Structure formats: C-alpha cells, structure tokens
Amino acid sequence: EAGVTQFPSHSVIEKGQTVTLRCDPISGHDNLYWYRRVMGKEIKFLLHFVKESKQDESGMPNNRFLAERTGGTYSTLKVQPAELEDSGVYFCASSQMRARTGELFFGEGSRLTVL
Amino acid sequence: TQLLEQSPQFLSIQEGENLTVYCNSSSVFSSLQWYRQEPGEGPVLLVTVVTGGEVKKLKRLTFQFGDARKDSSLHITAAQPGDTGLYLCAGGGRDDKIIFGKGTRLHILP
C-alpha cells in the first residue's frame, strides 16, 4: 500500500513568486492534514480536511495560503505571493480516524525555501 | 494556548545506557502520541496513550502518560545506535489539532 506522497520534495523560489505543494493521501483516508515546521520551531497545524470539506483551517497563517482538496482525494497548498517567513518544511498527513485517537500517517514533507 | 515542552532538547549517550525523555504541559490532553522522525522523512507514530497513568511498552521503549494527562515520558532501556533520531511528543485536545513539542534529538554512540 502506498504511503502519503508529497511533491515537490524541495522547492526554491524567490520572494513574491507562487508555489503549489501537492499531497496524495493514503487511499481511503478521509482525513487530510497540513502541518508546517519552521526552523527551530515545533511542527504546527495548518488545516484539516474531511473528504473535500475544510474542517478546521484555524492554523493557516494568512490569506496568502490557499488549500484545496477537490473530489476528496489529493490536496494542494498554494502560497501566493511567497514571503521569506514561509520557508520551512510542509508536511501532509492522512488518517482514517480523527487525529487525536487515530494514527496520522505523514508524508516525507516538502521543503520550501523562499529567497 | 496549549504547549508541549520536551526535555532534553538534545541527548547524546553511549550504547547500552538508559535514558528518559520528558514531555510536559500545563494543559490536559485527551491523548498523547510519540513519534519518531528520521532525516528527510515524516514523523512515524510509535504509540498513543489515552488514559491517565497508562503505561505502554514497545520492546525496549516504555511510554507513560501522567495521571493528570498533562505529561508523558519515554524511557529507553539499553539504548542502541538504531535508536538515534528525533523523538516528538504530540497531544490531542478536544478538537482535531494535534499539538507537537519541538522534539528531542537523540544520538546513541556505538
């Protein structure tokens, strides 16, 4: 069974440019989460999808971030325009059950570097 | 704001020694999870504890959830070089946001 896959693994862009990160969850997992780790900080929650619906997007930093999950399968996270402080590793995770009781399966992360 | 403080941040010990990593908070969590993360990979779940005072064992790893469900510990017996990695504790609250600690980077010297 394929795990959570994320693309790209590393992206280097200039301030002001746009980047789109993609996450393919484990097949059948309705719950999809985006997290971010900025250097020196803890992994922080960004948002949670249940199928195609946004269950909780309280962790999204600002309106430069847009997440979608059309059809309830893969998800994209777009940053437009990117700022220096957006640099970090963006993790996607999926689960069958809700996160607080079930197991979160993480992807390898997409490292974003904004110059 | 719920926070999880992990200690120590870094730990380097000799193979065969025992160690304990702590995860503390002033908040109550409905569950506490421990993850291990290798370089270039995402965190991988080791264990979930949900009951105050609960103890779970995974080979040489022993996980304990505090009675008040505010803290947890990870004890490794006879550490081996293969135990090297980043250990993260994560707490689940009433909502579905898992709160992560900053992690403990463990290095076991052969």
Image (tube, coloured by chain):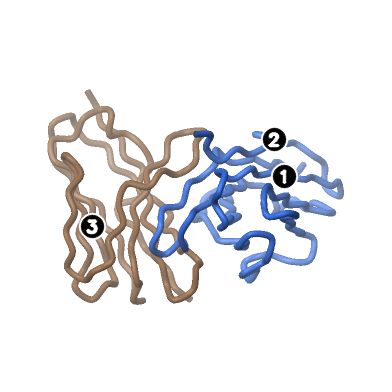
Chain colours: A blue, B brown
Instruction: Please give the name of the residue rendered at 31% of the width and 40% of the height, measured from the top-left corner.
Output: B106
Any mark on residue B74, and which? none
**Amino acid at circle 3:** Ser
Q: Which residue is mark 3?
A: B73
Q: Residue at x 41, y 53 (%)?
A: A103
Classify mark 2: helix, strand or loop: loop
Label 3 marks a residue whose chain is B
Query: In the drawing, what numbered circle is on residue A8?
Result: 2
- Disc 1 versus disc 3: distance between alpha carbons? 35 Å
Quarter occupied by residue A9: top right
Q: Is residue A89 above or below residue A41?
A: above
Q: In the rendered image, which quarter is residue A34 located in?
A: bottom right
**Chain identifier of the residue bearing label 1 in the image:** A
Q: Residue furthest front?
A: A28
Q: Position of residue A13 (x, y in %)?
A: 79, 39
Marks 2,1: beta carbons within 8 A = yes
Q: Are marks 2 and 1 on the same chain?
A: yes
Disc on the earlier residue, 2 or 1: 2
Q: Marks 2 and 1, how far apart in space?
A: 7 Å
